[in-house]
Image (cartoon, helix red, strand yellow):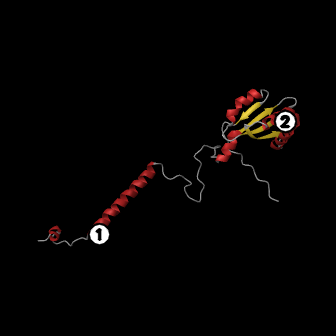
Amino acid sequence: MSIESSTQYPGRPRTPRVVWWLMVALTVVALGAGFGVGALVWAGGPDEGDDPGQARKSPYEAGIQVLTPEQYDSCVRQVSLYFEDDDADGTMREVARQLSDDDRFESVRERTQAETFEDFREVYADQPEMLNIVSPEDMGATVLAMAREGTTATQLEEPLGQEFPDAEIVVQKACPKPPTMPRPPSR
């Protein structure tokens, strides 16, 4: 009697081993798919927006957006020095001159009272009562300084406050979502 014949059952045809291995492989695949679906359900299912043609929802709360490194860098490096004295434009120009020679800053821009008033007029264009009670002289003048790369505005806030005690120093501690403004029509 051979070994082969001893493994056969009487009256039953011999099943090829390929079919048996195929059944084992299909069982393993089915178990793997079951575990995968179970893990997906356990994790909360697919997020809305997983469709490649659809924008993915932001994981951040409303008003917060992910900034590019350049946007973030610009946001955290800008320092505004605001002046409201009798000669706000003159004071602002003198401080801007001093800061433009300062190695801590890569750029310095001036914003006069008249420029600030123009912005005010645009914002309150639909409220004439506001425009009637405010004049350019009521506005402050501002120096907008961009700290050199590797320095944040918060690092410069205290030293600038000591150098310019008459200025209101404004730095951003967080970067807000920029407002969505309608684009002017193309000509």
Residue 22 rendering spot, x and y as whole percentages: 32, 66
Report the residue at 60% width, 55% height from top.
Answer: 55
> Residue 18's mark?
1
Query: Which secondary structure lies at badge 1?
Result: helix
* Residue 181 visible from this viewpoint: yes
For disc 2, the marked residue is 93
**Residue 77 lies in what quarter of the image?**
top right
Instruction: Give the side of residue 133 with respect to residue 168, left or right.
Output: right
Query: Which secondary structure lies at badge 2?
Result: helix
Q: Earlier in the sequence, mark 1 or mark 2?
A: 1
Report the residue at 72% width, 48% height from top.
Answer: 180
Distance, label 1 to label 2, CA atoms, is 88 Å
* Residue 135 visible from this viewpoint: no
**Residue at the extreme left of the image, as rendered:** 1
**Residue 98 lies in what quarter of the image?**
top right
Dot 1 amino acid type: Val
Instruction: Give the side of residue 6 with respect to residue 145, left or right.
Output: left
- Residue count near mark 2 (Cα–Cα under 10 Å), binned few <14, some 14–19, many ≥20: some
Residue 11 rendering spot, x and y as whole percentages: 16, 72
Q: Is residue 28 above or below residue 113?
A: below
Dot 2 amino acid type: Arg
Q: Quadrant of the N terminus?
A: bottom left
- Residue count near mark 1 (Cα–Cα under 10 Å), binned few <14, some 14–19, many ≥20: few
**Residue 14 lies in what quarter of the image?**
bottom left
Q: Nearer the viewer, residue 173 or 102?
A: 102
Report the residue at 82% width, 42% height from top.
Answer: 119
Residue 182 rendering spot, x and y as whole percentages: 75, 51
Q: Quadrant of the C terminus?
A: bottom right
> Residue 118's mark?
none
Q: Nearer the viewer, residue 162 or 7?
A: 162
In this rendering, the label closer to the viewer, 1 or 2: 2
